[in-house]
Image: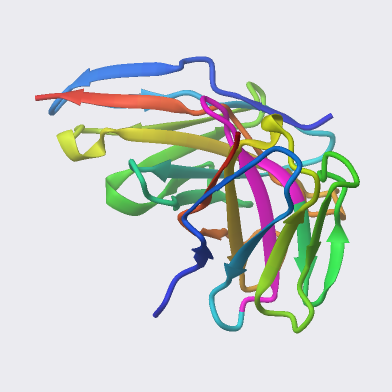
């Protein structure tokens, strides 16, 4: 079946602009995660959804970052007033339930803020 | 605080030799432990996990890992390395007591298998 997809694969934007990154999880997966991966680092947790609700958003670095999952499937990560330090690969993952289940990752969106 | 350490940034091994990629962790409660592999321009792929039970777990592509509670380690192993195993490997941990379901990843180990 289809895996996790993310669009766009690459996004270049100017400092101060607004961006939206989309994640389409595996069908039927109720848990969805967003991570940020900087060069030479492992994925850093941002936010976790169980269904439509953000069950844990403690990893969001500041209030410029926001994510939604209105129908419990597709999720959008939104970044306002982008800064050069926001440049990274943003990864999305899903699992059928939370807890001990392994996560299935998308290919990521590479965000570059100039 | 929860954390994962992968002490080696780079591991080189000759094809056919056994390989080990090291991982140690720190959690408040008991751990869920995972290994993922990342190939260039590809997403992370799940290899194996330890939840409970036997300390030696077997996973995809002939990989295995041994959970050692006293040493708080979860090293990834393979008896005979293949050139195609060359990739970036990440260890991850989640604390069973964490209601927020956060996973913590190490910084990764780049494995190069030399023909």
Q: Report the front residue among A32 and B16.
A: A32
Q: Is residue B72 left or right of residue A57?
A: left
Q: Which residues are magenta?
A: A29-46
**Residue drawn at (80%, 44%), measured in percent from left and top?**
A81
Q: Is residue B2 above or below residue B63?
A: above
* Residue B4 % position (x, y): 65, 28
Write down the quadrant of residue B13 in the picture: top left
* Residue B17 % position (x, y): 18, 24
Residue sitting at the far left: B115
Query: Where's the C terminus of chain B, which quadrant?
Result: top left
**Residue drawn at (84%, 49%), measured in percent from left and top?**
B98
**Residue drawn at (19%, 40%), measured in percent from left and top?**
B84
**Residue drawn at (67%, 28%), measured in percent from left and top?**
B25
Q: Report the front residue among A54 and A39.
A: A39
Q: Report the front residue among A11 and A60.
A: A11
Magenta stretch encompasses residue A98: no
């Amino acid at each position: 079946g289809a895996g996790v997809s993310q669009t766009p694969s690459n996004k270049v934007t100017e400092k101060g602009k607004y961006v939206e990154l989309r994640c389409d999880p595996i069908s039927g997966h109720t848990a969805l995660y967003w991570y940020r991966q900087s060069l030479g680092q492992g994925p850093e947790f941002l936010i976790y959804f169980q269904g439509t609700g953000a069950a844990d958003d403690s990893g969001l670095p500041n209030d410029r970052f926001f994510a939604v999952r209105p129908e419990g499937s597709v999720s959008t990560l939104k970044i306002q007033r982008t800064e050069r330090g926001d440049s990274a690969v943003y990864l999305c993952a899903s699992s059928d339930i939370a807890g001990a289940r392994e996560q299935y990752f998308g290919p990521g969106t590479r965000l570059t803020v100039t | 605080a929860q954390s994962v350490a992968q002490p080696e940034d780079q591991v080189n091994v000759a094809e056919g030799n056994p390989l080990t990629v090291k991982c140690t962790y720190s959690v408040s409660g008991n751990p869920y432990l995972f290994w993922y592999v990342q190939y260039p321009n590809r997403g992370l792929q799940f290899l194996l996990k330890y939840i409970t039970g036997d300390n030696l777990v077997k996973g995809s592509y002939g990989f295995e890992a041994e959970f050692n509670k006293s040493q708080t380690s979860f090293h990834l192993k393979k008896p005979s390395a293949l050139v195609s195993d060359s990739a970036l490997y990440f260890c991850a941990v989640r604390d069973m007591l964490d209601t927020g379901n956060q996973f913590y990843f190490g910084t990764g180990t780049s494995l190069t298998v030399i023909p």
